[in-house]
Image: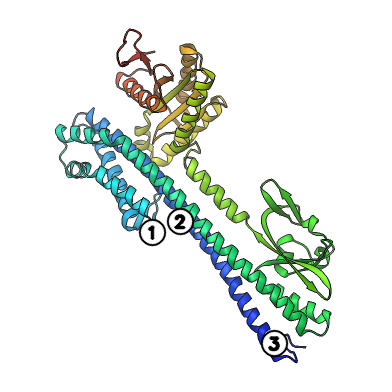
Amino acid sequence: MSLFSSHQPNNRRSLFIAICIFLVLDFAILGINVKITQEVESDALAINIAGRQRMLSQQLTKSALQLHHTQPGTDEFKRYSQEFTSVFLLFSSTLDSFNHGGDVIDSRGEVVRFSVRHDLQLAEILSITELELSPLIPLARRFIQGDHSMATVESLKQVLEARNNSLLKLMNRLTTRIEEMSREKTERLRIAQLLTFLLALFNFAHIIQLFRHSSLASSQLISHLSELLDNTSSCLLISDRRGRIRMANALARETFGYENADITSLTRQALFKLSESGWFGLQADGKRFAVELHDKQFQLDGQVLHLTTVIDISHHRDKERQLAELANHDALTGLVNRRVFYDRLELEVAHADRNGTPLALFFIDLNGFKPVNDTHGHEVGDKLLVTLAARLRDGMRSTDTIARYGGDEFVIIAPAVNGATDIGKIVTHLQKLIQKPVVINDLGINVSASIGIAVYPNPCSSSEELITEADAAMYRAKQSGTSYCYAMNSATEKKPKQVITETI
């Protein structure tokens, strides 16, 4: 008997229409899955580039400070001039891509296409950023065109120092808003996917009913149903009231790794398990994969059956984990990024208040890293940063937080320190970790570090002050050529506090 043969023309026509609708909805679900994957990849690129903008905004200030402390005409001044020029041009071109779209250089140095994201909050952030940069742009262009006078360098330094914190906050807001837009967009697509799936599920149940009425024998109905199920792109199972598998389509058999005779001898309990994170499927070889299960009950020849659609969501979960990893960790070293660092610092300050134990912040800047990049290339420089980051992560306490703050800058939050003695031991340990030679491509590379230290609650009374004072102490250590500097509160000053530097 043909699939559509029936003595009732209306039944046959209804069945044909229902199958066409089912196939359209099935391909719509597949299209939405592809769209979700594309959007996740696009948003991951946008978050990565926005995170890089935060680092570039700080590199601009650092380059201006280095230029300010270097004599024009020297080789060192030329290097810092080239660094400032490349950072400013990359920052400006990337910001323009956020506004107008176009080609942008990603973290691997490849040119990729970047699309404009239409959002009022995002547009407001970009507009404020352009306003903040307006005093800098003519100065930077004048410098790039060859005006290397001390007056121009001094103006660059003053403008960047005045806008350093505001630019950092704006770039953090930019990253956060893109993450929010990504979540909102993914949720909307998933709602559309779920609605489309429910429509397909109800339509499929309708198809089953039409099959029941259009077939004279249950064996012929099961044969036609099996053929339809095997030709769909969804993983489908039919089970009875006791959970025994009565039918599995081709994709289900392939997904779970069973032959038809084997899978129909199993129960739902043998194929699915419930964990704290949701349902997962069990393949014949024991491999697990995350799934979503959608059930629809129907009757066939007086039997109550369950149609189960199995959606493999392991790919989406992997993408979500990658997105979360990218949003919270530095792409090169794997250390936590600035956003997580700020959150951890606020949390540790609160713990220090609650427990009455001091908290130390170490601001580390590598000495000699720039010549490594210039001499051996950025690939060697990246491997050096990865190696030092692993040493810091493995060499510090499990309660300490290590973050990459900038290009060659790291910060460490050390809770529950017991005065200068503990801090001195930590600094000695840090210098040993950093100064130990690193061998890369048969090259023995040596670097050192300038370290700034600030302590909460004395002399610093907030997380923002901890960062500011530790950063300032690090620059004083670098300028004086000492190992590290310690920001301390003057014991004799009764007025607004004055931070003095003790070189140890």
In what element is the residue under mark 1? loop
Q: Which mark is residue 12?
A: 3
Residue at numbered disc 1? 115
Three-letter amino acid code of the residue under disc 1: Ser
Q: Quadrant of the N terminus?
A: bottom right
Which of 4 and 330 lies nearest the eye of the viewer? 4
Q: Which mark is residue 466?
A: none
Which of 341 and 196 lies nearest the eye of the viewer? 196
- Gap between marks 3 and 1, in whole Å? 48 Å
Q: Residue at x 40, y 50 (%)?
A: 106
Residue 139 lies in quadrant: top left
Q: Are marks 2 and 1 in contact (CB under 8 Å)?
A: yes
Could you classify mark 3 by the number of other residues whose Cα lies within 10 Å: few (under 14), some (14-19), or many (20 or more)?
some
Q: Quadrant of the C terminus?
A: top left
Three-letter amino acid code of the residue under disc 3: Arg
Of pointers 2 and 1, the one earlier in the residue sequence: 2
- Gap between marks 3 and 2, in whole Å? 45 Å
Q: Is residue 71 above or below residue 455?
A: below
Residue at numbered disc 2? 42
Q: Is residue 213 above or below residue 157?
A: below
436 sits left or right of 100 in the view: right
Q: Residue at x 58, y 51 (%)?
A: 318
Which of 344 and 57 lies nearest the eye of the viewer? 344
